[in-house]
Image (spheres, rainbow, N blue to C red):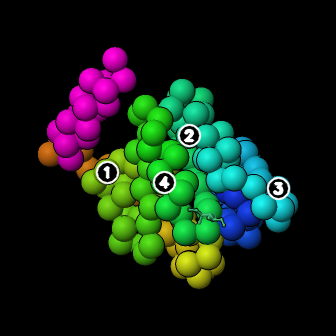
Amino acid sequence: MIAIGSDHGGLLLKEAVKKLLAEREIPFEDCGTDNGDSVDYPDFGERVARKVSAGEVERGILVCGTGIGMSIVANKFPYVRAALVTDSFMAQMAKEHNNANILVLGGRVLDESAAKTMVATWLDATFEGGRHQGRLDKIAKIEQELCK
Ligand code: RB5
């Protein structure tokens, strides 16, 4: 299950990504927003990141205007590794090296078709583990210390 969310700046791209998920028959939960009214991205980033952090969903996708705000919010949550990507190579590395469990996109900076390719690339990629797991373990250790 994928939780997906956006603010008004990411709404159109969120809807496009939902179509991709539906085409691939990947179950998703839309956490809003659902119209173009101006909203605050932390509210929707929180909804998705909480679910990923709690293990309620395996992955999340967040979209705001640039992707920056959503990245900042999502990475506050324990166990979240949110990656803002701007091309398919980054999307691939986000999974292969960083095991990113939330993909973040900028609705005002990305071409829709390119963004959908990034999502597909991230979904299809596999975490390589090995030395990359060791690096993620270091991040988890920092997180555990700070969250005590
Ligand atoms: C909303 O205007 C915009 O600030 C937001 O979508 C996002 O780009 C923030 O990082």
Quarter of the image with the C terminus is top left
- Mark 3 near ligand 1 (CB under 8 Å)? no
Residue 31 image position (x, y, % from top left) = 73, 45
Viewer-side label of 2, 1:
2
Separation of residues labelled 2 and 4 (CA atoms): 10 Å
Instruction: Please name the residue shown 56% across and 47% down the image.
Output: 60
- Judged from the image, the secondary structure of the residue bearing numbered disc 2 is helix
Separation of residues labelled 3 and 4 (CA atoms): 20 Å
Q: Earlier in the sequence, mark 1 or mark 4?
A: 4
Residue 147 image position (x, y, % from top left) = 36, 23
What residue type is disc 4 on? Ser
Q: Earlier in the sequence, mark 3 or mark 4?
A: 3
Separation of residues labelled 3 and 2 (CA atoms): 18 Å
Separation of residues labelled 2 and 1 (CA atoms): 17 Å
Quarter of the image with the N terminus is top right
Q: Earlier in the sequence, mark 2 or mark 1?
A: 2
Tag on residue 98?
1
Residue linked to disc 4:
71
What residue type is disc 3 on? Asp
- Mark 2 near ligand 1 (CB under 8 Å)? no
- Judged from the image, the secondary structure of the residue bearing numbered disc 4 is helix
Q: Residue furthest left?
A: 131
The answer to whether residue 96 is magenta is no
What residue type is disc 2 on? Ala
Q: Earlier in the sequence, mark 2 or mark 4?
A: 2
Residue 11 image position (x, y, % from top left) = 73, 64
What residue type is disc 1 on? Asn
Tag on residue 49?
2
